[in-house]
Image (cartoon, rainbow, N blue to C red):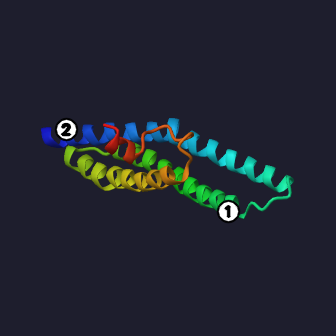
Amino acid sequence: EIQYDIYVKTINIEGLTMAGIARRQLLPAAIGYKASLASSITSILEAGGDAEVEKGVLARVTKALTSFNANLEKLEKAIAKAAGTSGARKQAAAYRDLVFTAMAKLREDADLLETLVDADYWPMPTYSELLFNV
């Protein structure tokens, strides 16, 4: 029972932290970058230029952002559902099956957005910055 409780508390804290960072930092950063891209496309088109490359990037960012937002909502629902599960063993299984899985999917989306969003917008250090600037 104690090990289940420790496991539940650990995954709950990780899930809440991940959801908080995603909602307060990563989502606004990606939205800001998307708005900047849209503005750039408008400026290019008004100047009579070709904005096909920018449109492609905007489409990829939009797709990734849509998936990110959906998986963020799934994570938040999974945390709430797992927290409402009674019994230590059942609750631990709910955190493993629901929350941990939702965290992995959100992480995949965050990793993709990190590669798409300009570094000036991205609020977190990249993997390369963590590896090589230590």
- Above or below, 18 against 47 in this view is above
Q: Residue at x 54, y 53 (%)?
A: 116
Disc 1 and disc 2: Cα gap in Å? Answer: 49 Å
* Residue named by callout 1: 53
Task: Please determine whether, in this image, residue 57 is positioned above or below residue 122.
Answer: below
Amino acid type shown at disc 2:
Ile
Percent of width and height locating residue 111: 44, 53
**SS of the residue under disc 1:** helix
The residue that appears at 65% across and 63% down in the rendered structure is: 56
The answer to whether residue 27 is above or below residue 60 is: above
| Quadrant of the frame with the N terminus | top left
- Amino acid under disc 1: Val
Q: In the figure, is residue 123 to the left or right of 56?
A: left
Counting every numbered tag in the picture gives 2
Q: Decide which of tag 1 and tag 2 comes sooner along the chain.
A: 2
Camera-nearest residue between 1 and 112 = 112
Camera-side residue: 119 or 22?
A: 119
User: Residue 6: which disc?
Assistant: 2
Residue 49: image quadrant is bottom right
| Viewer-proximal residue among 65 and 44 | 44
Left/right placement of residue 5 relative to residue 76 reads left
